[in-house]
Image (tube, grey):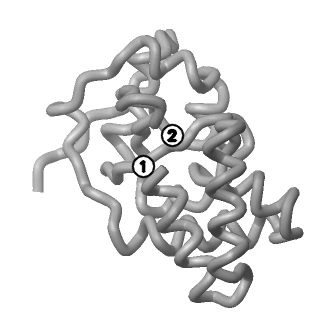
């Protein structure tokens, strides 16, 4: 629930929620397991696009950059997102840490990844940032896309 508290803090700082609103959302989230953003929308009429923008802004500040070659991909995590959603939105589920899904995306695709995961998941998630070319290759390999061959790029 730590991620939800940080999202709440961003929404409070931006003036969309009060501290009391955040506490009410966290209490309901504890009981229901629903995503913080979905609860903010249903309980306090905070638009989904506002939550997504705040989440993406917070992630840009704190997202860890990783090398996909050093990450293992858990098949249980892959099941959280369809192959077409992963490819269309350039987001790759990597693993589950408790109930939280850890997924990779690119800095340019962060807003789209947040929106997709907010819409598709009923669990908390954390994003890490990666380079675009390896992400495309890893999504293709992880989901078994046939016929996806990315040309090698010359080393600089």
Q: CA distance from mark 2 to mark 1?
A: 9 Å
Q: Answer with left or right where residue 3 lies relative to residue 17.
A: left
Residue at the extreme left of the image, as rendered: 156
Neighbour tally class for label 1: few under 14, some 14-19, many 20 plus, Cα within 10 Å:
many
* Vertical placement of residue 16 versus 93, above or below: below
- The residue sitting at 66% across, 47% down in the picture is 29
Which of these two is toward me, 73 or 10? 10
The image shows residue 31 at horizontal and vertical percentages of 68, 39
* Vertical placement of residue 45 versus 42, above or below: below
Circles 2 and 1, Cβ within 8 Å, touching? The answer is: yes
Residue 132 visible to an observer of this rendering: yes
- The residue sitting at 51% across, 63% down in the picture is 5
> Disc number at residue 91?
2
Q: Which residue is mark 1?
A: 127
The image shows residue 128 at horizontal and vertical percentages of 35, 50
- The residue sitting at 11% across, 57% down in the picture is 156
Which of these two is toward me, 48 or 9? 9
Neighbour tally class for label 2: few under 14, some 14-19, many 20 plus, Cα within 10 Å:
many
Check disc 2 and report its element: helix, strand or loop: loop
Q: Answer with left or right where residue 47 lies relative to residue 103.
A: right
Label located before the other in sequence (2 or 1): 2
- The residue sitting at 74% across, 43% down in the picture is 119
């Amino acid at each position: 629930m730590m991620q939800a508290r940080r999202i709440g803090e961003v929404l409070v700082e931006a003036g969309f929620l009060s501290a009391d609103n955040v506490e009410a959302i966290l209490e309901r989230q504890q009981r229901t397991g629903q995503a913080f953003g979905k609860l903010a929308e249903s309980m306090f009429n905070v638009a989904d696009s506002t939550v997504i923008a705040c989440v993406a802004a917070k992630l840009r500040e704190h997202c860890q950059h990783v090398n996909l070659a050093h990450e293992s991909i858990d098949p249980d995590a892959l099941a959280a997102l369809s192959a077409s959603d992963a490819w269309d939105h350039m987001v790759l589920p990597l693993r589950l840490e408790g109930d939280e899904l850890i997924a990779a995306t690119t800095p340019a695709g962060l807003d789209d990844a947040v929106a997709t995961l907010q819409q598709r998941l009923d669990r908390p998630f954390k994003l890490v940032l990666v380079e675009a070319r390896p992400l495309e290759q890893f999504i293709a390999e992880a989901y078994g896309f046939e016929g996806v061959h990315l040309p090698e790029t010359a080393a600089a």
